[in-house]
Image (tube, grey):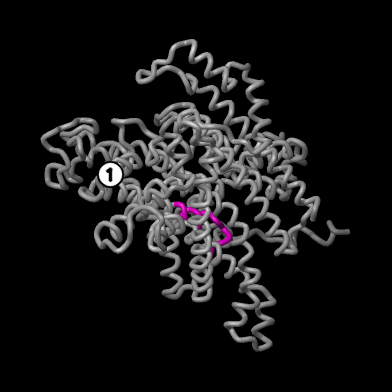
């Protein structure tokens, strides 16, 4: 009989010292603090983060401390090269290019962040529902995605812009209507792989509702790859805005985005190249920084790369 | 195989149906018709009525839609409402060969540069050549094509005066537009090729090849490359789409008389019938190319199940 073999006198209590040995002396490292620790060790990603922070601070506060405004014209100061008074020079209307580039940063960063945030939500809802419920629901939802993904999204964006007119709001609407597809597919594939894992099954066995399993178990565990995908949406949204504005279907004058500034500088690139240089630099530096942040996040959040 | 192809074609037709419907609805929802009187052009009401009747613009919208679908099925993309006696088919016939030539050169250049760069980066992993390739790939992904094209234009045409700034007369004219179009595809192909090469080099059959004494060069070129290049084939579809949208900017910048420039011009003129027709042409082109690439992929990779 087992209870006869395991008699109480065979056991003796631990001493206090021995009890202490069993206690975990270090706090357990959570997924996110672990990711942050790895992200911090990536010099390129940290440089990217600092650069974006600096650009954001300048974009928000810079124009407040400048004597110039983005639309203030000054005919006496047309096409001046960079100087102490005008750091990036002036354009053909005598407007200060530095302030205009800062306003461009406001527009670009707003578009990038808002587009990414909205698509994060739409992508999670669409992909999560499609992946978790599967079957007929998944079939129909994915066929819709297939139909939309067959054509370059820029064509749809241009059409929507033609319909809504040129403004920051239209660009945001156009981007939000088209960009969610990639995120939704990503979320779906994550949910598909996770929903057959033991812990999801266990949750189901003890009677957790579908909504709870999806929101408490599946989505938090797929958050890493989802965040990486959404981070890369920021530079591509900024790129799309600059691209459209460069073609003359983005922001309306006298508002300035980096794309319109570059576009305005084309006719005078032979005589005033600096008018092209600064907006081009601003776009490139921002894109580099955001891509480095995205790469860093991907390495930090992907446990398979953990050493 | 046949079933797979038919399925892809059916999916392509559905995609086109969505695109045509969305395009048609949006273009017809924009206030003001193509002949609406403007400040510069004051047309009497009777003339306007006659013109609109002539183009069927007074029919109910569903009738116009059916009529449009019918002419699309006949391959008629419509006529320009802004330019006299110009049809979209003529614009496409004039511009497409030009764009296709620049595009084809760009595809070839991106493959010729991207694939070897990726291979070298993978074999020399962690060495300086890997570092150089990956840095170039990062630059190619981060810098937008139009920024790069403008910088190249300034450097090589304006400052150094080595290369012409516009047109497509000689081979020299191709260098800058192709560089502008191909840079980001090169970057993607390099990254793709590197990671797939690294993956393949870890496989058992590569170890077997080495163990039986095959030289490292032959291991890479004969055994690894064939499998490693497959992901690049799947990228061909997105590559064609990227070159197409890239041409909107590059053709405008270098005054190349292709369809991309024509499309941007029609957007600037708000020439809705041309935008409609061009969009459908672009969409159809990309859909067809994607089907071709998918079939190609299924043919070269026997692991792809054709039933899906």
First to last magenta residue range: A294-307
Q: Position of residue A24 (x, y in %)?
A: 54, 57
Q: Position of residue A180 (x, y in %)?
A: 56, 39
Density class for disc 1 (Cα within 10 Å; few <14, some 14-19, many ≥20) is few
Q: Quadrant of residue A201?
A: top right
Q: Residue at x 61, y 72 (%)?
A: B225
The quarter of the image holding the N terminus of chain B is bottom right
**From where the camera sits, is residue A58 visible?**
yes
Q: Residue furthest top?
A: B45
Q: Is residue B3 magenta?
A: no
Q: Residue furthest right?
A: A1
User: Image check: A287 left or right of A131?
Assistant: left
Q: Nearer the viewer, residue B221 or A129?
A: B221
Label 1: which secondary element: loop
Position of B207 relative to A277 (above/below): below
Q: Quadrant of residue B78?
A: top right
Q: Residue at x 67, y 51 (%)?
A: B291
Q: Is residue A305 magenta?
A: yes
Q: Position of residue B301 (x, y in %)?
A: 71, 63
Q: Residue at x 49, y 15 (%)?
A: B48
Q: Nearer the viewer, residue A219 or B26?
A: B26
User: Image check: B7 left or right of B58?
Assistant: right
Q: Residue at x 67, y 36 (%)?
A: B74
Q: Quadrant of residue A100?
A: top left
Q: Which residue is mark 1?
A: A267
Subunit that carries the residue with mark 1: A
**From where the camera sits, is residue A112 visible?**
no
Taken as a whole, is the magenta stretch helix, strand or loop? helix
Position of A33 relative to B263 (above/below): below
């Amino acid at each position: 009989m087992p209870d006869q073999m395991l008699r109480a006198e065979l056991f003796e209590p631990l001493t206090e010292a021995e009890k202490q040995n069993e206690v975990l002396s270090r706090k357990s490292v959570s997924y996110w603090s672990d990711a942050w620790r790895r992200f911090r060790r990536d010099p390129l990603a940290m440089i990217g983060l600092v650069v974006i922070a600096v650009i954001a601070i300048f974009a928000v506060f810079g124009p407040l401390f400048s004597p110039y405004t983005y639309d203030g014209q000054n005919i006496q100061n047309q096409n001046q090269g960079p100087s102490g008074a005008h750091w990036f020079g002036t354009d053909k209307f005598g407007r200060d290019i530095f302030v205009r580039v800062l306003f461009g940063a406001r527009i670009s960063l707003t578009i990038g962040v808002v587009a990414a945030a909205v698509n994060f939500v739409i992508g999670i809802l669409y992909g999560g529902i499609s992946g978790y419920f599967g079957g007929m629901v998944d079939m129909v939802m994915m066929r819709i995605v297939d139909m939309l993904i067959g054509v370059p999204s820029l064509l749809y964006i241009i059409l929507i812009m033609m319909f809504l007119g040129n403004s920051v709001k239209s660009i945001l609407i156009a981007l939000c209507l088209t960009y969610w597809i990639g995120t939704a597919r990503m979320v779906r594939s994550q949910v598909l792989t996770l929903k057959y894992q033991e812990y999801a099954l266990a949750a189901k066995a003890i009677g957790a509702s579908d909504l709870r399993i999806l929101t408490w178990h599946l989505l938090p565990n797929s958050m890493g790859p989802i965040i990486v995908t959404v981070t890369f949406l920021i530079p591509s949204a900024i790129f799309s805005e600059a691209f459209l504005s460069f073609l003359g279907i983005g922001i309306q004058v006298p508002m300035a985005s980096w794309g319109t500034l570059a576009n305005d500088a084309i006719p005078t690139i032979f005589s005033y190249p600096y008018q092209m240089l600064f907006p081009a630099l601003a776009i490139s530096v921002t894109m580099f920084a955001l891509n480095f942040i995205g790469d860093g996040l991907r390495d930090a959040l992907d446990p398979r790369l953990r050493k | 195989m046949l079933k797979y192809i038919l399925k892809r074609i059916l999916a392509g037709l559905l995609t086109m149906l969505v695109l045509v419907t969305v395009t048609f609805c949006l273009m017809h929802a924009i206030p003001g018709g193509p002949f609406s009187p403007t400040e510069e052009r004051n047309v009497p009401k009777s003339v306007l009525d006659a013109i609109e009747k002539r183009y069927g613009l007074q029919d109910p919208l569903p009738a116009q839609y059916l009529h449009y679908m019918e002419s699309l099925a006949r391959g008629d993309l419509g006529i320009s409402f802004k330019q006299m006696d110009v049809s979209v088919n003529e614009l496409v016939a004039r511009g497409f060969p030009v764009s296709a030539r620049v595009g084809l050169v760009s595809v070839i250049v991106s493959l010729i540069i991207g694939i070897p760069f990726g291979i070298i980066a993978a074999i020399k992993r962690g060495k300086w050549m890997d570092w150089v390739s990956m840095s170039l790939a990062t630059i190619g992904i981060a810098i937008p094509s139009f920024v790069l094209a403008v910088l190249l234009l300034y450097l090589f045409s304006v400052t150094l005066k080595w290369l012409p700034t516009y047109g497509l007369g000689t081979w020299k004219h191709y260098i800058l537009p192709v560089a502008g179009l191909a840079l980001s595809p090169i970057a993607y192909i390099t990254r793709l090729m590197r990671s797939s090469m690294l993956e393949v080099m870890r496989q058992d059959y590569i170890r077997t090849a080495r163990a039986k004494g095959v030289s490292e060069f032959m291991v890479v070129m004969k055994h690894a490359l064939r499998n490693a290049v497959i992901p690049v084939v799947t990228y061909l579809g997105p590559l064609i789409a990227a070159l197409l949208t890239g041409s909107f900017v590059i053709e405008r910048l270098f005054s190349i008389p292709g369809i991309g420039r024509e499309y941007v011009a029609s957007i600037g003129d708000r020439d809705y019938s041309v935008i409609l027709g061009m969009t459908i042409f672009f969409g159809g082109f990309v859909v067809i190319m994607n089907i071709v690439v998918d079939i190609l992929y299924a043919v070269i990779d026997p692991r792809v199940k054709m039933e899906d």
